[in-house]
Image: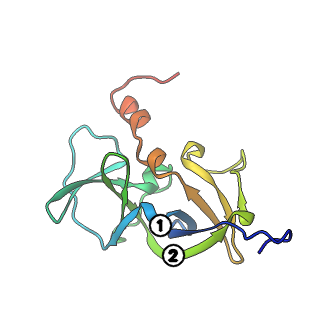
Amino acid sequence: MSENGVAANVRQLCTFFLEGRAFGVPVEEVREVIRHQMTARVPLAPAVVSGLINLRGQIVTAIDLRRRFGMADRAPGELPVNVIVRTEDMAVSLLVDQIGDVVEVSDEAFETPPETLPEIDRHAVTGLYKLPDRLLILLDVEKVVDLSSFNAAAAGIGSS
């Protein structure tokens, strides 16, 4: 209950980590979490596309979130975890460093992303949750998997 006696809206988020920072996506958008899978490289794909994985006969694009958000690559031997998410059109694998817990957050803890949010594409961030032990960055799955700006860059097309 909030201070005015109205129940706070609570949602569940699947959390994961990149470079020690906590991120989350709505649990209803997560299909499954699986260990590292071998990827098949895709010629001429943007660097953020790690490759394709075969998920029980379904071909799924794997997007490396470290590259997507301009972070350093993982050290050799550090294998990512696949967070398989649903979009309107398809399933996509988000490659993350480590999976976290499913957490419940209330609207009261939600804040819009600050202008100074470092190293993250603000366009893909819905907001932040201040948790007791850390800051949780909420991602918009549809915007995270939209690689149109990366495709234009890969094709040598300038964006204005």
Amino acid identity at mark 1: Val
Residue in the foreground of this view, choosing between 75 and 37: 37
* Disc number for residue 84: none
* Left or right: where 18 falls relative to 74: right
* Residue 149 in the image, given as x and y percentages of width and height: 44, 33
The image shows residue 41, relative to residue 77, as above or below, that is: above
* Residue 104 in the image, given as x and y percentages of width and height: 60, 74
* Residue 26 in the image, given as x and y percentages of width and height: 51, 62
Coloration mode:
rainbow
Image quadrant in which the N terminus is located: bottom right
Residue depicted at 33% across the width and 54% down the height: 92
Q: CA distance from mark 2 to mark 1?
A: 7 Å
Give the mark nearest the N terminus, 2 or 1: 1
The image shows residue 29, relative to residue 125, as above or below, that is: below
Residue depicted at 28% across the width and 40% down the height: 45
Crowd class of label 1 (few under 14; some 14 to 19; many from 20; radius 10 Å):
some
Most distant residue in the right direction: 4
Residue in the foreground of this view, choosing between 91 and 18: 91
Most distant residue in the left direction: 57
Check contact, mark 2 vs mark 1: CB within 8 A: yes
* Disc number for residue 27: 1
* Disc number for residue 102: 2
Q: Is residue 52 visible?
A: yes
Q: How many numbered discs?
A: 2
Q: Is residue 82 visible?
A: no
Q: Secondary structure at mark 2?
A: strand
* Left or right: where 130 falls relative to 92: right
Amino acid identity at mark 2: Val
Quarter of the rendering containing residue 148:
top left
* Left or right: where 83 falls relative to 43: right
Residue depicted at 16% across the width and 66% down the height: 56
